Amino acid sequence: KLDLNGFRTLGFSVKKVDYKKEPVALRVRFTNQFKENSEIYVKNIPARWQDYRINLSDFKDISEWSRMREVSFVVEGPGAKEKRGVLYIANVKLLK
């Protein structure tokens, strides 16, 4: 039941390890109490730390930000199918 009204941006840092040269993507998904879902894809996760900022307004299918249930990060892509490697996510924050 987190109220995210007033926040404008989701920030986080991410890097992959041991995925060799296979591309890996990250699906970032918000869900609210009314079961509205919206997701953004971050493609080609690098092997070095990279900072990302996503505007909450880019999550088009969320109409009510005052009763959020969860944010999730899902690893996808050809590299993820092997189920080898590690994806690190750090410094997750909401910015006003």
Image (tube, helix red, strand yellow):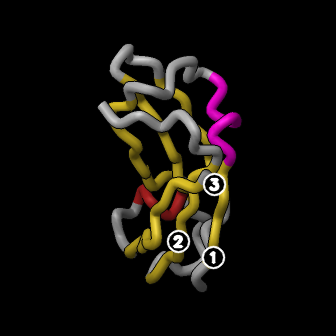
Residue type at numbered disc 1: Gln
- Secondary structure at badge 3 equals strand
Q: Position of residue 30 (x, y in %)?
A: 46, 36
Task: Say which residue appears at 54% left-offset and 57% top-offset.
Answer: 78
In magenta, the rendered stretch is 55-60
The answer to whether marks 2 and 1 mark residues whose Cβ atoms lie closer than 8 Å is yes
Q: Circle 1 sits on which residue?
A: 50
Picture coordinates of residue 5, whole percent (x, y): 53, 33
Mark 3: few/some/many CA within 10 Å (<14, 14-19, 20+): some
Up-down: is 84 above or below 59? below
Find the distance from the CA under tag 3 to the CA under tag 1. Answer: 11 Å
Residue placed under numbered mark 3 in the picture: 42
Do the numbered discs 2 and 3 sit on residues whose CB atoms are within 8 Å?
yes
Labels 3 and 1 touching (C-beta < 8 A): no
What's under tag 3, amino acid-wise? Answer: Val
Q: CA distance from mark 2 to mark 3?
A: 10 Å
- Quadrant of residue 56 in the image? top right
Query: Is 49 on the left or on the right of 93, as rendered?
Result: right
